Image: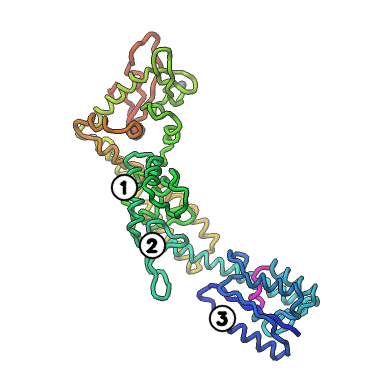
Amino acid sequence: MRAVIYTRVSSDPNNLGRSVDEQEADCRAVCQREGWQVVRVFSDNDRSASRYAKKERPQYQALRAYLEGGKADVLVMWEGSRAQRDLEAYLSLRNLCARDGIGYSYSGKLYDLTRTDDRFTTGLDALLAEREADVTRDRVMRAVRANAAAGKPHGRLLYGYRRVYGDTGQYVAQVIHEEHAEVIREAARRVASGEPCRSIALDFNRRGIPTPRGGEKGWSLSQIGRMVQNPGYIGKRVYLGKIVGDADWPPLLDAETYAVCRSILTDPRRKTQRDTAVRHLLSGPALCDVCDSRLRVQKNRTHYGYVCAERFCVSVKTTVLEQFVVAVLMGRLSRPDALDLLAPPEDRGAVERAREEVKQKRARLTEWYAAAARDEITPTGLAAIERTLLAEIDDAEQRAEHIEVPPLVRNLVGPAVEQRWERLTIGQRREVVSLLLELRVGKTYRGARSLDPARLGNSRWRGDSQTWAERGLV
Ligand SMILES: [Zn+2]
């Protein structure tokens, strides 16, 4: 009989199975004992046969073609799981061998797959092999989570870093790639100072700075935005899109710049601002006090006016409203206690508490990961705990990030604020207004020609519980 041998080893470093050479030697011994002539050996090294495996097994495909070509009478393997850990693959191989009368041999036994008993035995082995693969996968998933909890990197390398490996190829550390890191730092600095992602992307492309994955297309604005908000850059480990703890690599951005980038880029008001024309200071931040719609700029017969975009409840001349609002804003920012006003002490207390909460919940999550790694809770149990805790951590983190004074505003406060304001671009000025004001414009009184400040009475400083009217500002 003509025998074909198939050997395979997976990449599992702890695999206690035999090497392909040892497997082949065993199979050859079986062939010699049975008096079979070995006509061909197929071998897949470093391949997994489970249904979770992503790699193709080229030699396995070649083996099937070889058998289908009628070039062998018996298939010899070291054990059943060498060929497949997947029932579908087993069935297709079984049908092939049964149809063409090819013998099926593993663990030193020969099976005739047209016989009921042999189909049962080999089928059962295939079932067991599949279960083993599932168990292995669960184990690997637990290891991935434990790595995540321990802050170790997993998967694709984060742009801005490089990995250091030891002599035997094991992971040692993830360290900063200085040249790439400078690109990230520059982008973050510019985003934090209020520059739009689009202009940063254009500038990077003009300077020919390569993108993280190379490529011809160059930087896009969404890429800049995603990059400066990646928690990996402040040394946080992310698992399934959530921060799960501190990473074992050094942060590349300082936490403050990062928080400012995030608060600017995740601000829900931002989208509206991008959609409207940039030349008007208050279209976007300003709301109609009657119906909560945004105000947009419209041209009347004689002048431009901010008008309630939905129902036309209110209308006010652009220059009049802008002059008034800027005057109030400058008054606020030139006060010696301006910075304190931006972040009131009671809010600082809340931020501290939120930070502490984040720390404690992360620690608890880490303990759960450790428990899962020791098999004390099931993966399903862990997933449920993870979901709850990660949602709570997310919530606390948002509270912790809330009150940061962006550099754009911080650099503005102090005497002679008007001169610094004049130097800002219109985009930066809008950013300042959005960060500091909740501007609400009330109804026009019949016959009123100039702006009655009382119409802005329901406006307030962002984060302040009292309105401008209550503070006696208008
Ligand atoms: Zn309205």
Part of the protein shown in magenta: 79-87
The residue that appears at 25% across and 38% down in the rendered structure is 411
Give residue 29's quadrant in the image: bottom right
Residue 464 in view in this figure:
no
Q: Is residue 435 magenta?
A: no
Give residue 334's quadrant in the image: top left
Residue 321 in view in this figure:
yes
Q: Mark 2 is on which residue type?
A: Arg
Compared with 148, 65 (above or below) is: below
Element type at mark 1? helix
Q: Earlier in the sequence, mark 3 or mark 2?
A: 3
Q: Alpha-carbon distance for marks 3 and 2? A: 32 Å
Task: Say which of marks 1 and 3 sits in front.
Answer: 3
Kindly indicate whether the residue at mark 2 contacts the one at mark 3 (C-beta within 8 angstroms): no
**Colouring used for the render:** rainbow
Residue 412 position within the rendered picture, expressed as x and y whole percent measured from the top left = 25, 35
Q: Mark 1 is on which residue type?
A: Glu
Q: In the rendered view, does 148 fall on the left or right side of 456?
A: right
Q: Which residue in the protein does label 1 denote?
A: 256
Q: Mark 3 is on which residue type?
A: Ser
Q: In the rendered view, does 192 fall on the left or right side of 108?
A: left
In-front residue for pair 254/221: 221
Element type at mark 2? strand
Q: Which residue in the protein does label 2 denote?
A: 162
